[in-house]
Image (cartoon, rainbow, N blue to C red):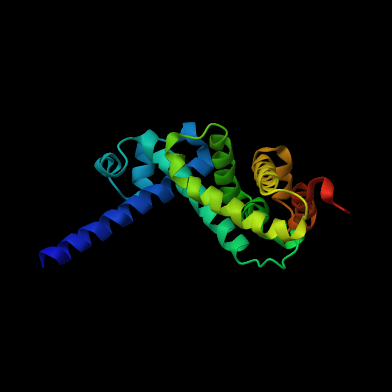
């Protein structure tokens, strides 16, 4: 029974933690990082202030963890999409998979785009905690380079990795730039039609047509 109670407490604690993260992201999307209060988060999550102290330590650390959580979900979706490609996949198919999470955020607008804007903004000077996601960033680049190697002959892995990082930066810029808000009113298929050739061009570099 003691072990069962421990498991139940652990599950309840995890639900509380996830509820606080979700509430924080919703409020960040509505008000921005500087406009969110601890009381608003706990009221929305149905939790108490002590839970924030227990799980995160402070409001600032909770907000950082919420943004990190959103970034990790983005990376996981990107990794899953790119990892599904084979070496026979085209650069356009890679561009579509690599950009898919951002395309969805841009096309959906609202909360999802607001969260991605915050992630992109924080990513300009990322907090130390993001170091734990280094492996996921590297996995995303590695899988992209795997496809590019078969499509862009004569270009070394280091340069292909650089192009992949540039493509990622382009997507982050779209989340922040006014054009990103303009795309929020555009159907997802049209966003893809506009964006995929641009990302594919970043991957190909000067090798296009060669």
| Left or right, 97 with reference to 155 | left
Image coordinates for residue 120, horizontal then vertical, percent: 58, 40
Give the position of the N terminus as an image quadrant: bottom left
| Left or right, 104 with reference to 42 | right
Image coordinates for residue 78, horizontal then vertical, percent: 59, 56
Image: 187 above or below 33:
below
The residue shown at (48%, 31%) is: 34
User: 72 and 15: which one is in front?
Assistant: 72
| Left or right, 202 with reference to 45 | right
Q: Can residue 138 be seen?
A: yes
Image coordinates for residue 20, horizontal then vertical, percent: 37, 48
For the image shown, how many numbered marks are present on the structure?
A: 0
Q: Can residue 25 be seen?
A: no
Q: Quadrant of residue 6?
A: bottom left
| Left or right, 204 with reference to 37 | right
Residue lying farthest to the left in this orientation: 1
User: 39 and 164: which one is in front?
Assistant: 164
User: 145 and 82: which one is in front?
Assistant: 145
The residue shown at (60%, 47%) is: 113
Image coordinates for residue 80, horizontal then vertical, percent: 56, 62
Image: 32 above or below 152:
above
User: 9 and 41: which one is in front?
Assistant: 9
The residue shown at (16%, 66%) is: 4
């Amino acid at each position: 029974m003691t072990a069962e109670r421990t498991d139940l407490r652990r599950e309840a604690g995890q639900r509380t933690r996830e509820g606080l993260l979700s509430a924080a992201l919703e409020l960040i999307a509505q008000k921005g990082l500087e406009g969110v209060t601890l009381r608003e988060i706990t009221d929305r999550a149905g939790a108490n202030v002590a839970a924030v102290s227990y799980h995160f330590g402070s409001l600032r650390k909770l907000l950082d963890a919420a943004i990190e959580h959103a970034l990790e979900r983005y990376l996981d979706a990107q990794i899953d999409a790119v990892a599904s490609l084979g070496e026979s996949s085209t650069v356009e198919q890679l561009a579509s998979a690599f950009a898919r999470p951002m395309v969805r955020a841009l096309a959906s607008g609202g909360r999802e785009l607001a969260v991605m804007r915050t992630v992109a903004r924080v990513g300009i000077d990322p907090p130390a905690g993001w170091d734990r996601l280094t492996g996921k960033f590297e996995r995303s680049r590695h899988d992209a380079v795997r496809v590019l190697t078969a499509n862009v002959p004569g270009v070394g892995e280091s340069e292909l990795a650089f192009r992949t990082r540039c493509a990622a930066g382009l997507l982050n810029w779209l989340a922040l730039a006014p054009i990103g808000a303009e795309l929020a009113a555009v159907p997802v298929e049209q966003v893809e039609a506009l964006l995929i050739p641009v990302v594919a061009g970043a991957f190909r570099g000067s090798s296009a047509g060669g």
